[in-house]
Amino acid sequence: MSYLENIKVFEEYEKLLNKVSTYITNESEIEMIKKAYEYSAKAHYSEKRLTGEDYIIHPLNVALILTTVRADYETICAGLLHDLIETNDSEYEDIKNNFNETIADLVKGITRINKLNFEGDTQAIIASNRKILVGLTEDVRVIIIKLADRLHNMRTLWAIPEKAQKEKAKETLDILTPIAHRLGIGSLKSELEDLSLRYYKPDIYFSIVEMLNKTKAERDCNVDEMIKSVSEILNNKGIKHKIKGRSKSIYSIYKKLDKGKKFSDIYDLLALRVYVDEVEECYQALGYIHAIYKPMPKRFKDYIAMPKANMYQSLHTTVFGVHSELFEIQIRTYEMDEIAENGIASHWSYKEKGSNTKASLKNTMEQKLQFFKSIMELNDKDASDDEVVNTLKEDVLNSSVYVFTPNGDVIELANGSTPIDFAYRVHTNVGNKMVGAIVNGNIVPLDYKLKDNDIVKINTNNNSKGPSKEWMNIAYTTQAKNKIRSYFNKIDKQEYLKNGEELLKEELRKKKIAFNEFLSTENVNKILTELKYKDLEELYTNLGNNKLPLGTVINIIYNENDTKEDLILKKATNNEVVLPTIKNDIIVRGIDQIKVNVASCCKPVPGDSIVGYITKGNGIAVHRMSCPNVKDVEERIIDVEWNNEISKKYPTSLLIHSSTNKDVLLKIITKTSNSNITVQSINTLNSNDSFAFELVVVVPDLEKLNKFITDINNIPDIIDVERVIK
């Protein structure tokens, strides 16, 4: 049976086509949407959801939700196809061939973020933030599709167990609804919040519903009366308009109750929204309404002159309306309302192909989506989870301050920001050249905390030497800190670059190798390919910061048949290690002239707890206290201790387990370069399904050894490191 023979599927499909035809007029684009439906229906044929419905109902509803934000045809197609790559990786190529690469990439982006799971509150924040990073790497539309996907799943959340319901609801509230807010998609955000509260805190949700139902008839009557009154005021003044009663969301009521307010004290339960054609009519309408109905003090907000970061614009006022009831009234243009409901989705810059407005629109989007730019910058720099979480907390979850440039432009910053954060938000060069700040006409220190309505002027000097490292402790936002860090990284890189080139030249001079001959085009290509570097700059930088040994570079050219592992092994085993004489390094209480040896089974090093074992004819063997070979021989045990001043190094054995053998030895040897540790020998112990390396390293003391072990443990793919006792 064809899916379209199923009445519900047919109705949803017809509804989708009717919706897209209201704003997509290109026939080829509509045909592509039809093709995407047929492709998805065929792939999901016979599959069922937990609700018992045919699976195709889900992608159809995701596509329908996307039409409410007037998504373009590629986004609609990706919404219809979004679950296909999850079960079949080869599907990506099929989607690309049947549709286009953009649609395939959107589906792939959704697949990536849907595959990432998390556990626990802390991990939930970190992992969900990583979802956002992956989803935004290439196209913000991935997040729009994700929000639509989650919204339909929330509408059918009753089909999964209660524990899973609460987990999904909490994740939605913690991560996805702030993102919907930041994107300005109020239509999705509000429903996601209400549904999340319904499953996360059902008792509170239904108690609010009950309170609202008790007063519904009276509220509806008052709202209708107020609409007629305001409409009459505006008609008399010749202002074309439309007015709607606005229901306050259950979640927003919950947030006010959660802050300690009583239900009877929530003023904006009675609310109107007034729509007009032009911006000036917003202010005219406000004045005419205030002339009749007294405004409540401190309840007026002008988001037209000072838009929110998510592009939201509107006038908000609370007035004493009919029967002296308090009414919140929002006044906006129809265009402002579309942006308030659909946010960034109302300005698809990629639709403006060939348009003169494309550049300016793209610039506007970049300004409004500073949050996402900050996140992507962190992703590019391979930031730690802590940095990502801090950025989210600052830019999404924290409150903001709104300050002005001297020209009157509004800049939104995280609460707690300083003039340094302001300067770097304006432009990186402004931050780097900053020499002082003036706020409201007064010179302020750089650690001054900016407040709402501050007018901030940054003094710059082209001869400035750049930011101070101390600014890292003063700046509040992760974005500013990253830019300061980037400045110093660039300076360090230039220094490393210069040092690396000099080190290589010096080494080649010692070996009597001509520099130009060594760096012939053929040799350079071979070195870069072997080390997986993109250019000579990267090579010099890694030489200059000691991440890459000089010998490794030279051996690539002059030991052509050796693998990297062979080179490492040769380098390690060719080290001339002078084993210590330990006569004065270990003190044997009460005995001066006696032969003392370090036991080869456990290889103690200075700093280890040690014990002496009296051998037959070979003096005293010094073991680690934990060595099992001296565990049950108390009659031959003697007290020994390390001397306080030891200048020699001692060998000890390490066993290193790894999940791979690719480049691991190179990374391990690299860790010895700045640690005063020498590798004496390497033994590779690979089996079919595991990789292990036994290293004998020569170390000055236990502290250096433990640091070396920690450094190795921090290498990706390393499973564990242990000292060997034989």
Image: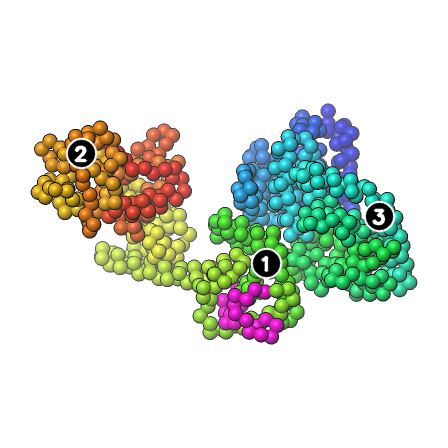
Marks 1 and 3, how far apart at CA: 37 Å
Frontmost of labels 2 and 1 is 2
N-terminal label among 3 and 2: 3
At label 2, counting other C-alpha atoms closer than 10 Å, the crowd grade (few under 14, some 14-19, many 20 or more) is some
Where is residue 680, by image quadrant?
Answer: top left
Disc assigned to residue 379: none
Which of the two residues, 689 or 91, is positioned nearer the viewer here?
Answer: 689
Tell whether 574 sits left or right of 314: left
- Answer above or below: position of 677 versus 473: above
Range shown magenta: 428-450
Whether residue 26 can be seen here: no
Q: Where residue 189 sits: x, y (%)?
A: 69, 47
Q: Amino acid at mark 2?
A: Ile
Q: Would you name the residue on which mark 3 appears?
A: 219
Residue at screen point 69% across, 63% down:
306
Q: Would you name the residue on which mark 2 appears?
A: 637
Q: Amino acid at mark 3?
A: Arg
Disc assigned to residue 414: 1
Q: Where residue 502 sits: x, y (%)?
A: 31, 61
